[in-house]
Image (tube, grey):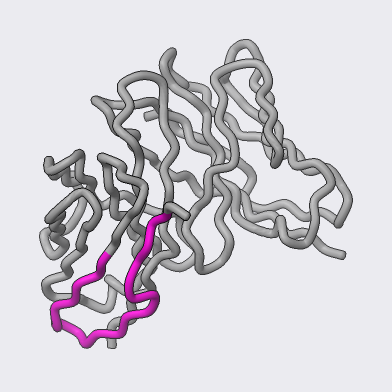
Amino acid sequence: DAMVIQNPRYQVTQFGKPVTLSCSQTLNHNVMYWYQQKSSQAPKLLFHYYDKDFNNEADTPDNFQSRRPNTSFCFLDIRSPGLGDAAMYLCATSRDQREGTDTQYFGPGTRLTVL
Amino acid sequence: LAKTTQPISMDSYEGQEVNITCSHNNIATNDYITWYQQFPSQGPRFIIQGYKTKVTNEVASLFIPADRKSSTLSLPRVSLSDTAVYYCLVGGLNTGFQKLVFGTGTRLLVSP
């Protein structure tokens, strides 16, 4: 089945130690998104890739970076994780569609713990 | 992006119909209304989407009045597995991608 896969599902890192979360998709979608979801809160968009074009949300901290080496893969890099970065990180994809609207397909998420 | 308002939580029992209303007073002409469902420790899942009147699929119905300033998600005969957070989102495409701004969501608890 076509899907969005996130690895690992659970990640523990130390304060200040860089960490990378990965996302892959078999849907061949043009757009990939990263969301941060803290406990009991709604998902918040960090940035997205439209093909290779990177689009950062205005309030996304510089500590968060992303890479998309090809259509199928996208990475979230947290350069110096702080305690406040502990959250569920969700990857999503959608097709390139010029009219109307489209559905986003979410992965299961990676829960990040910062010690 | 249109702001949405929905109840923080709702309680129901198995077999009942649940209606969750979302208000979006400043919806734009080209905005669609979309509902997502999220179970604990999972990513949100698309439920239904509509522009006006009524949309029905195998999971739910979406009722949108003529002024489109509100919408109602209807879940027929809920079961325990429908316990989840339901998000109402309003928006359209922007140069080929869809920007989703999640509101607080409605936490639905279904009891036996």
- Which residue extends farthest front? A1
Left/right of residue B21 with respect to residue A97 in the rendered view? right
Q: Residue at x 44, y 45 (%)?
A: B102
Q: From the top left corner, tell me how far across and down residue B34 is, in percent.
A: 52, 34
Q: From the top left corner, tell me how far across and down residue A108 is, in percent.
A: 44, 64
Left/right of residue A16 with respect to residue B58 in the rendered view? left
Q: Can you tell which quarter of the image residue B29 is in?
A: top left
**Magenta stretch containing residue B96, yes or no?**
no
**Magenta stretch containing residue A15, yes or no?**
yes
In which quadrant is the N terminus of chain B drawn?
top left
Q: How many marks?
A: 0
- Chief SS of the magenta region: strand
Q: Can you tell which quarter of the image residue B31 is in?
A: top left
Relative to B1, residue A38 above or below: below
Q: From the top left corner, tell me how far across and down residue A80 is, in percent.
A: 13, 75
Q: Can you tell which quarter of the image residue B59 is in?
A: top right
Relative to B39, residue A33 above or below: above
Q: Residue at x 33, y 27 (%)?
A: A97
Relative to A83, residue A41 above or below: above
Report the span colored magenta.
Answer: A3-22
The residue lying toward the viewer, choosing from A93 and A84, is A93
Relative to B96, residue A14 above or below: below
The residue lying toward the viewer, choosing from A81 and B47, is B47
Q: Residue at x 34, y 56 (%)?
A: A91
